[in-house]
Amino acid sequence: MALFTKEPEKNPKLQPTTTPPASSASSTQPNLQGSAGSQTGRAGGAAGGEARAYLDRGSKLSGKISFEGPARIDGEVDGEINAKDALTIGESAVVTAQIRAAAVTVAGKVSGDIIASQRIEIRPSAKVNGNLSAPVLVVQEGALFEGHCSMQPEGVREDRKVTVFPKEERMAQAAGGQKQA
């Protein structure tokens, strides 16, 4: 037992040598999982939160996947994806799946329906083929989207009032606004 208590005393000398590279993980650990975590942090940071789960390029999954926290996918997925938090589909991702998440940001290729309880954002590099359902939908210029979209949340909102003017009234209002200017 005395040997086991003495060895941990020697190990702290090793720990300081492993701690400094962790602060400069990008330069000293390019092939370790730590660098994937730093990539995730950079990619997730741009979206407003750090992704805790990450499927890198070259990853291929088939089946049902569930994420508890924020996640990012840059690989290939075939099946079903459920996320309780934000999900980011990266530019290199190819996803053939039904997706359910709080918020979904798509920059890659997705074939399948996407249902989000908060928001769906389709970036310019995205190609989406499927139906979308979310209270907030953002489709950036350059994105390809083929399908139907519904912006009603699960419970019908009666507090939103939408007034649609006939085309003639809109034209008259626009002309009236130009005359005043």
Image (spheres, helix red, strand yellow):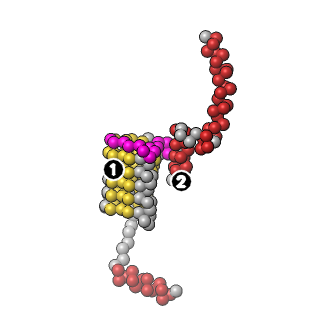
Residue 170 falls in which quadrant of the image? bottom left
- 158 and 127: which is toward the camera: 127
Residue occupied by mark 2: 46
| Secondary structure type for disc 2 | helix
Q: Amino acid at mark 1?
A: Thr
Q: Identify the magenta region.
A: 48-63
In the picture, measured across the screen, residue 52 lies left or right of residue 147, that is right
Query: Depth-wise, is mark 2 or mark 1 nearer the camera?
Result: 1
Query: From the viewer's perspective, is residue 130 above or below residue 1?
Result: below
Of the numbered discs 2 and 1, the one sitting upstream in the chain is: 2
Q: Is residue 42 left or right of residue 65?
A: right
Residue carrying label 1: 96
**Residue 65 image offset from top left, x and y in percent:** 37, 41
Amino acid on which the number 2 mark rests in the picture: Ala
Quadrant of res 148 = bottom left
Q: Quadrant of residue 153?
A: bottom left
Please tell me the numbered disc located at residue 80. none
Calculate the distance from the C-alpha at mark 2 to the C-alpha at mark 1. Answer: 25 Å
**How far across and down, in percent of the image, does residue 168 sit?**
35, 83
Establish if 34 lies above or below 165.
above
Q: Nearer the viewer, residue 158 or 9?
A: 9
SS assignment at label 1: strand
Residue plotted at (43% across, 52% down): 92
Where is residue 165? Give x, y as percent.
36, 77
Q: Residue at x 64, y 29 (%)?
A: 15
Q: Answer above or below: position of 151 versus 78.
A: below
In magenta segment, residue 61: yes
